[in-house]
Amino acid sequence: MATVFQSLASHRGIRKLSSGLVIENAKDYAPRPDDHDYIRRNDAPWIKRFASAGGEAIISGDQKMRSDPAEREALVQTGMVVFFFDPAWNNFKFCDKCAMLLHWWPQTLGIAETAPKPSFWRIPATWNADAGIAQVSHADLSLELVERQKAAAPKIRARRAPAQTIHPAQPELDLLETKNDKTSDKQKA
C-alpha cells in the first residue's frame, strides 16, 4: 500500500493534507542477510534504521509487532507513533484496504502530528467515521494478560481452622449401655 500512497501523494488534495510528509516503504530500510544488524524475521533493525533516518510514524498491518518483545521495544525506544490495522483488515482485498486507509487518512495524519511519543493506535475496519482511530497500549501484551488474569482471579483467603478438642465418644458409650440394658432386660424375662 505504501506504493499506492506514494503515487497519491502527488495529488493536490492528498498533498494539501500531507504537507511535507514523506511516504516510504519499510523494505527500503530492511537490512540484508549480510548486514551487521540483520535479524531473520525481525522488524526491529528496520525500525531502528527508519528512526535514525528521521522517521516518526509507522502504519503497519503486522499485528505481531505489538506482541514481539524486540519489535515492540524498538518501536517504544525510538518513540514511534504506530498505527495498526484492526485484525478484520486481513479479510479485505488489496484495493479495499487501500480505499479504507484513504478513508482514514486525514484522521491518521492528524493523530501522527499530535500524538504522544511513543504511542500505538488501531485503525478500525469500518467506514463508520464515528468508530474513530483508537489508542491502544504499547505495554507487553502477554504481561497485561497475566495482570488481567490475576485481577480477575477470585481471592482465596486461607485461615487456620480453630483447634478442635477431641472428646471421648460419649454417644457410643450410651449405645453400649442401652444395648447391655436391653440384654439384661431379656435375661430377666
Image (cartoon, rainbow, N blue to C red):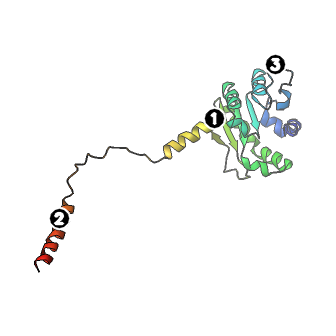
State which tag comes first along the sequence, 3 or 1: 3
Q: CA distance from mark 2 to mark 1?
A: 73 Å
Q: Which numbered disc, 2 or 3, marks the residue closer to the eye?
A: 2
Residue 24 appears in view: no
Question: Relative to 91, does residue 46 appear above or below in the rendering?
Answer: above
Q: Which numbered disc, 2 or 1, marks the residue closer to the eye?
A: 2
CB-based contact (under 8 Å), mark 2 and mark 3: no
Residue at which label 3 appears: 36
Measured from the top left, where is residue 62 in percent x and y?
Answer: 76, 39
Measured from the top left, where is residue 174 in percent x and y?
Answer: 17, 64
Image quadrant containing the N terminus: top right
Q: Which residue occupies the foreground of this view, 168 or 187?
A: 187
Res. 129 mark: none
Q: Which residue occupies the foreground of this view, 15 or 112?
A: 112
Q: Amino acid at mark 1?
A: His
Residue at which label 2 appears: 174
Res. 138 mark: 1
CB-based contact (under 8 Å), mark 3 and mark 1: no
Question: Relative to 180, does residue 12 appear above or below in the rendering?
Answer: above
Q: CA distance from mark 2 to mark 3?
A: 91 Å
Displayed quadrant of residue 51? top right
Q: Amino acid at mark 3?
A: His
Tell me what residue is drawn at x 26 percent, y 45 percent.
163
Q: Which residue occupies the foreground of this view, 10 or 135?
A: 135
State which tag comes first along the sequence, 2 or 1: 1
SS assignment at label 3: loop
